[in-house]
Image (tube, rainbow, N blue to C red):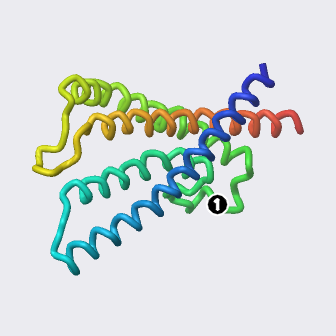
Amino acid sequence: MDRFFASLETSINHFTEYTGKLSSWLVLLLVLLTCYDVMMRYLFQHGSVGLQELEWHLFALIFLLSSGYTLKHDAHVRVDILYRSNRLNDKHRAWIDALGIVLFLIPFCLLILISSWPFAYNSYLYQEGSPDPGGLPYRFILKAAMLFGFLLLMLQGLAELIRNIRTIRSHQEQK
């Protein structure tokens, strides 16, 4: 059973690394598109609603795809008053992280997944697009990305939970 969980953790971590690297390329694309948009608007007085919408769609994708990657690399915002102090060892930190994942992260992700499913599904059924003239069609893709992003975050939370349980168990076996 330990081998299964170790394999699951490794698989999730690899997939999270892949999506994190993909989102870093999307950042480059966003920068290039924004520079192009600014240049076209201010130098040539030619703006594009579709291009501006694509910029915020890319920003949303970057945020959603990189949330699991950020969790994996322990880069989310946290209050480190006690967590990073010398009073807590790795076992205590693992307990704090495991409880945070079980009590907050996974329920929050499930809440978002459950509540956003009809939102994305209805958008797909009605083939929702931009209400603005010249805007992008297929807004349901972005709404479905919200489901995918929170699923990635929840999966990475599961991988972190497995790692924390392994840390807790290894400290108990050392005693």
Q: Which of 126 and 118 is in front in this view?
A: 126
Tag 1: residue type? Answer: Arg
Quarter of the image holding residue 120?
top left
41 vs 8: above or below: below
Q: Name the residue under label 1.
A: 84
The residue located at (72%, 36%) in the rendering is 10
| Residue 167 percent location from the top left of the image | 76, 40
Quarter of the image holding residue 172?
top right
Q: Quadrant of the N terminus?
A: top right
123 vs 21: above or below: above
Left or right relative to 31: residue 67:
right
Quarter of the image holding residue 108?
top left
Disc 1 packing (10 Å; few <14; some 14–19; many ≥20):
few
Q: How many labels does the image show?
A: 1
| Residue 86 percent location from the top left of the image | 71, 62
| Residue 112 percent location from the top left of the image | 36, 33
